[in-house]
Amino acid sequence: MIVGTLLVSLAVEFLQACDLFTGQIAGLSLVTAKATGMSFGSVFFLMNLPFYLIAYLRMGLAFTLKTFAAVGLLSVWSAILPQFFTLTNVHPLLGAALAGVTAGAGLIVLFRHGATLGGVGIVAVWLQDAKGIKAGWVQLGFDVLVFGLALSFFDLNAVVFSLVGAAITNIMIATNHRRDRYIAR
């Protein structure tokens, strides 16, 4: 849980350094934080609250508690990391690619340990487990909506670079997260 959330928090740092965003609830939280001036961690935590009921009803108490802990850890990491280092002069394409890889790896770690970072991840993991629909493709579908909204707050180049990062994340998840592979118990 610590490694997975730390990797995703590092991805958020890459995105923020390049004024980029991602998809899913994390992306919607970054867009909202930019629009309102609130911190990413606060917005992210609040936006995830309604999804815990879905998690509990569809995935069970253990999954819900692990997801709640992961969301809390990501919010804490997102507040702590900027106190210790700052990323500067990162080309947006490199920042998007590194964010995509670190977020993808972090999410796979969390999925394999029975947790998500809430929101769409909850629905995506449930659909993959219950219906066989790849979690990465579900998330990418939601991302299209987030990217459409982001056009109101970001320029076209930022949207395109951000889409590269989100695509990398979701392709990593779609190709690497399978129930027939290692799942921690």
Image (cartoon, rainbow, N blue to C red):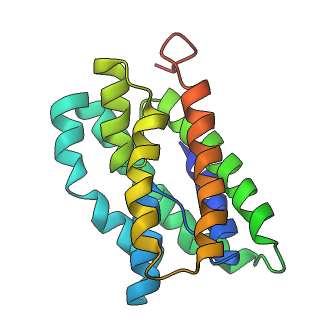
Side (left or right) of 56 relative to 87? left
Which residue is at the front of the view, 69 or 151? 151
Q: Is residue 48 left or right of residue 177?
A: left
Residue at 53% of width from left, 42% of height from top? 1
Q: Residue at x 25, y 29 (%)?
A: 59
Determine whether, in the image, residue 109 is placed left or right of residue 98: left
- The residue most toward the front is 156
Rendering coords of residue 14 (x, y %)? 69, 67
**Where 102 sits versus 155, above or below?**
above
Q: Nearer the viewer, residue 116 or 32?
A: 32
> Number of numbered discs present?
0
Q: Is residue 48 visible?
A: yes
Q: Position of residue 47 (x, y in %)?
A: 29, 64
> x%, y% of residue 167?
60, 47
At which x and y percent is residue 46? Answer: 29, 67
Task: Name the residue at 40% across, 38% down.
Answer: 138
Residue 41 seen in the current view: no
Q: 136 or 65, which is in the foreground?
A: 136
Q: Which residue in the rendered view is the most extreme toward the bottom?
A: 37
The quadrant holding residue 80 is bottom right
* Residue 87 sits above or below residue 105 on the image: below
* Residue at 24% over, 58% down: 49
Asked if residue 15 is positioned above or below residue 116 in the image, the reply reads below
- The outermost residue toward the top is 180
